[in-house]
Image: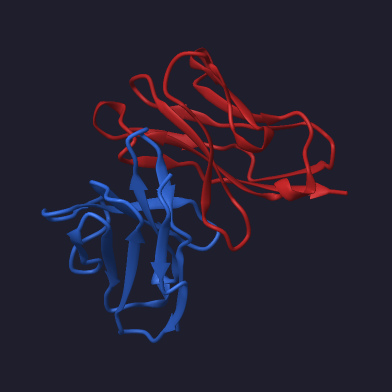
Chain colours: A red, B blue
Amino acid sequence: AQSVTQPDIHITVSEGASLELRCNYSYGATPYLFWYVQSPGQGLQLLLKYFSGDTLVQGIKGFEAEFKRSQSSFNLRKPSVHWSDAAEYFCAVGAGYGGATNKLIFGTGTLLAVQP
Amino acid sequence: SAVISQKPSRDICQRGTSLTIQCQVDSQVTMMFWYRQQPGQSLTLIATANQGSEATYESGFVIDKFPISRPNLTFSTLTVSNMSPEDSSIYLCSVHDRNNEQFFGPGTRLTVL
């Protein structure tokens, strides 16, 4: 069965430091992978996605993620974190028919705190 | 990207009552989805709603508890029936666009007393 694991429940980084949020997935075929961010009291916003091609994908707000098939991972990175990045981050895999995105399976989320 | 609105944004309800949540999209979409996010938890898909057909429910969710309507290509409702405190959650509507991306509404925060 398809699944997504985010091993880190809570991460704290200093403003200006680099960030890496881990995501591992279990899926039989080439997955469609996503990162979403949920700020307090806000809805979910799509940061970036991977469908195929270049395994390093760029997203909004300076985020990037790298798909590594051999490790079944899709880790999210940012070189320099801003205080406004404090939020909860969800990794998701598209698990519909033929790997489509009509059904998303979400990880449990990583709550990011940013220290001044 | 689609713009999605939900009503109500939040509500506090009594046990045993029902609440209908509305989802409106600013463009026509084939597929609409309803998710639940329980306190401190991740999102779980409740059902997929296509216009003109019965909603498709995920394991653990049934039509009697979560009836869904999809009268046209821009609107859907989810009803949470015979509520109990365990139904306290954020309920989110989402749509699927031609770029294979899902966009989410702001959510409805439901508290059941």
Is residue A85 rendered to the left or right of residue A28? right
Is residue B8 rendered to the left or right of residue A18? left
Q: Residue at x 49, y 41 (%)?
A: A107
Q: Is residue B17 above or below residue B40?
A: below
Q: Is residue B55 above or below residue A79?
A: below
Q: Residue at x 34, y 63 (%)?
A: B23
| Along the viewing direction, whichever of A65 and B23 lies nearer the viewer | B23
Q: Residue at x 77, y 38 (%)?
A: A81
Name, please, the residue furthest toward the right: A116
Q: Is residue A72 above or below residue B6?
A: above
Please state, as top left, top right, bottom left or bottom right, where the N terminus of chain A lies in the image: top left
Residue B36, image quadrant = bottom left
Is residue B31 rendered to the left or right of residue A7? left
Residue A77, image quadrant = top right
Q: Position of residue A87 (x, y in %)?
A: 66, 51
| Along the viewing direction, whichever of A109 and B100 lies nearer the viewer | B100
Q: Residue at x 26, y 53 (%)?
A: B47
Q: Is residue B33 above or below residue A107?
A: below
Q: Position of residue B85 (x, y in %)?
A: 42, 76
Q: Position of residue A39 (x, y in %)?
A: 62, 54
